Image (spheres, coloured by chain):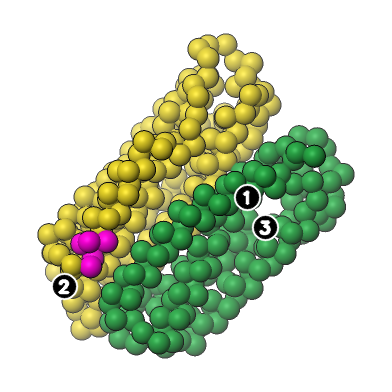
Amino acid sequence: MTDVGRLPAGTLDAAPGPPRPQIQVVPLRGLPIVAAVVAFVIASIAGNWLWALVFCHVVGGALWTAIDLFVGLIVGPILGRLSIPARAEFSARFMPKMVLLMPTLVLMTLAAGFQLALREGNLAPTSPNHVWLIVSFCVVGVMAVIALGVLEPANIAVLVEMRKPAPDGEVIARLMRRFLVTAGITGVMQVATLIIMTRVATQ
Amino acid sequence: MIADPNQVAAGPTRPIDRRFPPVAELATVSLALVVVGGVLMASYVPRRPPLGVPGAIAAVSAALVLASVFLLSRLDRFAWDRFFLAFRWGLLAYVISAGMIAFAFIRDHTRGAPLALVLGMLVIFALDVPLIIAFTVARYATPTE
């Protein structure tokens, strides 16, 4: 994505290619699935149900880490080399799904993980895992601030911009630069999470 | 440097060329402080955490979000319709999210002053994120007269 900062205003509108797809910022069809996942996580916590807590934490965490690294290290650089209309079309279909998917995975992983740590006594000061979990809280904290304070607002603002009759390419480029700037930090944090969690699981 | 909000009104026509006060930046720092406070509190679970440092962090965080709202309220010719549309939906999403975190703390028998502090931090969290999202959306929108 080395040239994203040079998209001129109105580039998307003026670019040749297929007509731009209709963009739905929040895919409404996905909301019942999100509601079901949230209900399942609440039930798991309320019931302190070991299998469900492990399922939510492991499945949510694996998907979160894998998607983050795959998008940051594989999809992002490929996207940066596509033509502007191709990039716009891909983003228009891809980003609304991420608006629902990533917060759901994060919620599922963290809520179930915290309850699991309590249930298993890993948060007790005497536990050998205590320090590792505090470090993981810090790692998650950094990722949360980046995700919620920097990336999600940019993601939604890009989608809103792309819904306009004549999207401003410069606005989209400026907002998408945030993904580039933070990809390295997020990647390091995700690798740190993998190290911490495999360590916790084997102590 | 904080831009004069009145400059916005007199600024160029394209939203991207306008200068805005650091509304999103202040709210992001406020969010970061709430996260730090939350990590401090969570690191003591299941023991009762000392409340001095997390309380001070929450107070500074609340002051920053208030400063952010104040700067926002002084903006002239701003896409308020876009702002409130994004803010409403963001608030709904993050009230649910904060509610789940509160539920986890209550479920784990956090009571009294620590619970009050956690709930205060969650209120700030549930305001910070929609505020940042809505401001980021609205700053690039053309205001309707």
Q: Is residue A144 above or below residue A93?
A: below
Quarter of the image for residue B139 reads: top right
Q: Secondary structure at mark 3?
A: helix
Q: How many C-alpha atoms fall within 10 Å of the one at disc 2: few (<14), some, or many (≥20)? A: few
Which residue in the protein does label 2 denote? A120
Mark whose residue sits in front, 1 or 3: 1
Rendered residue at 72%/64% (across/down): B70
Q: Are marks 1 and 3 on the same chain?
A: yes
Q: Nearer the viewer, residue B97 or B30?
A: B97
| Label drawn at residue A188 | none
Q: Secondary structure at mark 2?
A: loop
Q: Nearer the viewer, residue B93 or A203?
A: B93
User: In screen coordinates, is B6 left or right of A113?
Assistant: right
Rendered residue at 54%/77% (across/down): B57
The chain assigned the colour green in the figure is: B
Task: Measure the C-alpha gap from mark 1 to mark 3.
Answer: 15 Å
| Label drawn at residue B23 | 3
Q: Position of residue B23 (x, y in %)?
A: 67, 57
State which region is magenta: A42-46
The chain assigned the colour yellow in the figure is: A
Q: How many marks?
A: 3
Q: Position of residue B52 (x, y in %)?
A: 49, 87
- Whichever of callouts 1 and 3 sits on the residue coming sooner in the sequence is 3
| Label drawn at residue B84 | 1
Task: Measure the C-alpha gap from mark 1 to mark 2.
Answer: 43 Å
